[in-house]
Amino acid sequence: MALLLDTTTIDSHAVIAELHNAFRVAGTAPGLTVTPLVPHHAFRARVSGWTIGEGTSLMHVESDPITLSISSSRLRTAMADRVALVAVSPGSWSHRQHGVVTHTDSRESTLLMVDQAAPYDFRRADRGASTIVHVDTNLLDLPPSAVRRAIQRLRPSSRLYQLYLSFLGELQEVAESNPQVLSELHATTTLLTHALILDAAADTSGSAGDDTPDIVRRVKAYIERNITDPELSAGSIAIAHNISVRGLYKAWQMTDTGLQDYIMGLRLDRARDSLLDQPHLTIAAVARHHGFADPTHFTHRFRDRFQLSPRDWRRIHR
C-alpha cells in the first residue's frame, strides 16, 4: 500500500464513500464515520497507508477540516480491538474519549492516543495532517483498563511522549522513502507502543501543575484514597484538612472541574474499569464498591457519562 486516496482525482459525489473506504483499508475501526466540514466539491484530502507487520499498520492523512467519530451503536456491530497512536500536526482541533476532552490550538505537534474499541469524536477546524500507527491490542499483552488509563493520563511530561512522537515522524519518513524496511520495525513498533501505554497508565504525576496550591494537591490525593467511601463530601474533605467548606471551594477554583463533578467522574471512571477487570461482580456490587449507595443512581450517572448502561458497557467491551 501507499497512496489510498487523493480527492482531487475523484468525483465530488464519491468523496464520502471513498474516504470511508480509504480509512478502513488503512486500519481504522470499521464503524468510523468520516465527515468533511467543508463542501464536498471543495474538500481536499490525501490518505496513505502501509502495513508494518501482522496487526500493525501506518497511516498518513492530510485533509481540510474534518470530523472522525464512532458511536456506541456503531461499535455494537463493528468492534475493533485496536489502539491508535497519532501525531497530530499543529493547529486547532478537539478530541473526546473515555471522559477526557482535549481542545487545542497548538503550534507544536501533539501525541494523541485513541482506543478504537470505544466511542470517540475528533474534530479538526483547519487543514492539517496526522500520522497514525494502529496496533492490535492482542499484541500488547495489556488489560483494556491500562489503555483507558493511558488515554486519561498521557501528557507531554510523560517520559516516553516525545520519544514516541519522534518515532512516528521517523516511521513516516521510512514509509515514504524505503517502505520495504517497515517490516523490520514491527517488533520495535509493538514494544514501544506497549512501553508508552504502560508508562502513561502508571503515571500519576502532572495531574496538578506546579502553580496548583498544595492544598489542592493534598485534597486530590485524599479523594483518591477515599473515593470508595459513600460519605465522601465537601464537608468531610474540609474537616480532614482543617479548613472550612468555603475555603475548600475557594482553593478548588484553581482547577478546571467542579469538586462534585471531579469526585463523580473519578468514581465513574473507576467503576467502569471494575466492570471489565472484575467480571464476577454484579452491577450493584460494583456500584457499592465505588461509593454509590443506590445502584439505580449509579446506572443513571454512568449512562449520562458514557452513553451506555453499565451492563451494556460490560457486554460490549469484554
Image: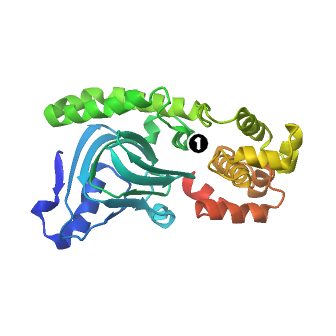
Please give the name of the residue rendered at 85% of the width and 37% of the height, measured from the top-left corner: 241
Decide if residue 232 is in sight here. Answer: no
Residue ranking furthest to the left: 9
Whole-percent x and y of residue 186? 31, 30
Q: Nearer the viewer, residue 109 or 273?
A: 109
Whole-percent x and y of residue 266? 68, 48
Q: Is disc 1 surrounded by few (<14), some (14 to 19) or many (20+) residues within 10 Å?
A: some
Q: Is residue 6 above or below residue 52?
A: below
| Side (left or right) of 73 relative to 181 | right
Q: Nearer the viewer, residue 169 or 52?
A: 169
Whole-percent x and y of residue 27? 32, 49
**Among the 4 quarters of the image, the one containing residue 214:** top right
| Side (left or right) of 23 relative to 111 | left
Whole-percent x and y of residue 6? 15, 56
Please give the name of the residue rendered at 58% of the width and 64% of the height, measured from the top-left corner: 307
**Residue designated by label 1:** 145
Please give the name of the residue rendered at 47% of the width and 63% of the height, measured from the top-left corner: 71
| Side (left or right) of 95 relative to 308 | left
Residue ranking furthest to the bottom: 13
